[in-house]
Image (cartoon, rainbow, N blue to C red):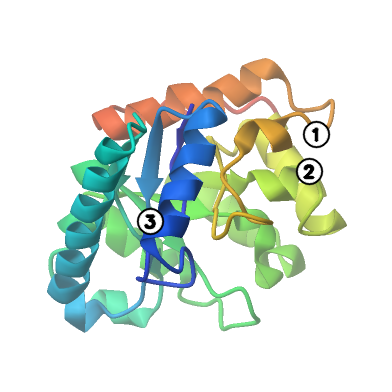
Amino acid sequence: MIDIHSHVLFEIDDGAENLKTSLQLCLDSYRNGCDDLVLTPHFFEYDNISDFVEERNEKIEILRNALSEKNIPLRVHPGAELFLSDDIFEAENLDKLTINGSRYMLCEMPLIPFDTRFITRWFDNLFDRGYIPILAHPERYYEVHNDYQILEDLIDRGVLFQVNLDSLIGLNGLQPQILSIDLVEQGFAQFIASDAHDTEYRHTRLIEKLNELPDEITEEMVEQCLIVNPQKVLNNEKIEIKITDDF
C-alpha cells in the first residue's frame, strides 16, 4: 500500500514531535502493509517556499538515514499539504511542493467557516500552472456539509479527492463518515490515506483501521485508493476518474 498523506516528518508541523516518533510511525506503517509513505507537512507561507523546502528535505534525509540504520525498508517521499488561500495568486514556482516531483499536489482548505467565493479560483490557478490538485479530506470541511455544490464544482474541474481512513470508520463523526463513504463508493474519491499525526490516535497502522471499514467499501475500492492510484501519483502517470453514480 501507499499512504499519500501523512504528518510523519519530525519537528516541522503539528505531526511527529521528534525523530523517535517519526521512526515509530514509519515502522508501524511498514508493519501494516505500506511500502511507500508520502511526507506531507503543512505548508502556509507562500512567501517563504525555499526555507520550507530546505528544512523539509534536510529532515527527510535524516529520516531516511535513520530508517536505513534501523533496517526499516519503508520508502519515504517528499510532498506537502498546501493550505489554500488568496496568497497562492502571488506565489511563484510551486514545483517543489508537489508529491515526489510529480504534477500532483495535495491541498487543504480551512476546516472552520470561511468565505467560499474564491475556492474555484484557487484550484483553477493550480490547473493553469500545470498541477493536478488533490483535495485532502473533503469530508471534514464545515462549508462542504453546508453546500455540496462546492464538491460538484471541483469534480467538474477534475480535482481529485483523498478521504481519511479515520472518516470512513467513523472516528471524525457521522456526517464525515457518510460523505466519505459516498465519495469512495461512487468513484469521486481516488485516494484513502492516514493523515497520520501521532502514534496513538491518528496513526499509521492502516490494517488495524481497514479491518473496521463498513461493508460498502469493497476490497476493489481499497486497492484502487491505496495501491493503484497512489502508485500513479508517484510515477506521475494519469489517473482515470471512474464515476459510478451521480453525486
Tell me how far mark 2 sits from mark 3, CA to CA.
22 Å
Q: Which residue is mark 1?
A: 212
Q: Amino acid at mark 3?
A: Thr
Q: Earlier in the sequence, mark 2 or mark 1?
A: 2
Q: Residue at x 29, y 43 (%)?
A: 77
Image coords of residue 113 (percent x, y): 65, 82
Which residue carries the number 2 mark? 169
Q: Which mark is residue 40?
A: 3
Q: Callout 3 environment at 10 Å: few (<14), some (14 to 19), or many (20+)?
A: many
Q: CA distance from mark 3 to mark 1?
A: 25 Å
Does residue 240 appear to the left or right of 140 in the view shown?
Answer: left
Sequence-wise first label, 3 or 1 = 3
Quadrant assignment, res 125 = bottom left
Question: Residue placed at 69% from the left, 56% from the top?
Answer: 201
Q: Which element carries disc 1, helix, strand or loop? A: loop
**Circle 3: element type:** loop
Q: Count the marks.
A: 3
Tell me where residue 237 sits by quadrant: top left
